[in-house]
Image (cartoon, grey):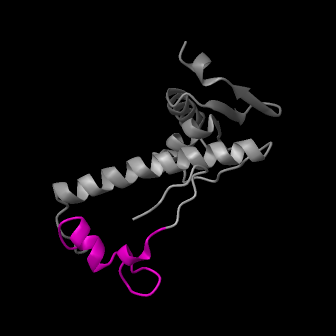
Amino acid sequence: MLDIKEDGTFPLNMRYFNYPTWLTMTSGQFDRLFGGPRREPESQVTQREMDIACSIRAVTEIILSQLIHSVREKYDAVIIDTPVAGNSADAYIIAARAKAGLIVARRNVTRVARIDSLVERMGVARAAIGYPAQRGLTVRNAASLQD
């Protein structure tokens, strides 16, 4: 279905996917490979769909790790824009793989408790955290947040 290269890039075997030309993401070949048709919108999520999602997530994390490693070897600085950290686990996973995270907060809008919570969660991900301080940007090692 996909061939993951050493640098994390991957060509997809488009026989399994319809999204470039149809209104569905996957094709009949995908259905046959994974033992049944795609789940209809709003229908019950079964163990099969959860297993497929878990497998996709595992492969995605491998790809992400390889891509980040490859890009970090080529460039001095890499910025990865993620979903809002409080709304998605992806930000924490990416921060852990990238070994850094930057929390951007708005003065008089973002609550300090919210920032502290995000810093604590990023610390659990063992990422280095950058967050706004009174002056400039303070970078703390996540390991120090565990103490």
Classify residue 134 as left or right of residue 55: right
Residue placed furthest toward the right: 135
Classify residue 145 as left or right of residue 86: right
Establish if 138 lies above or below 54.
above
Q: Nearer the viewer, residue 33 or 81?
A: 33
Establish if 39 lies above or below 47.
below
Answer whether residue 35 is magenta in the image: yes
Give the residues drawn in magenta, as a range.
Answer: 12-38
The percent position of residue 26, horizontal first and vertical second, equals 34, 75
Classified by dominant secondary structure, the portion drawn in magenta counts as loop
The percent position of residue 36, horizontal first and vertical second, equals 18, 70
Residue shown at the point (83%, 31%) measured from the top left: 135
Classify residue 137 as left or right of residue 62: right
Position of the N terminus, as image quadrant, is bottom left
The percent position of residue 136, horizontal first and vertical second, equals 82, 34
Residue shown at the point (50%, 32%) measured from the top left: 121
Residue placed furthest toward the bottom: 21
Residue 105, can we see it? no
Residue 126, can we see it? yes
Residue shown at the point (56%, 39%) measured from the top left: 97
Answer whether residue 66 is magenta in the image: no
Residue shown at the point (75%, 29%) measured from the top left: 138
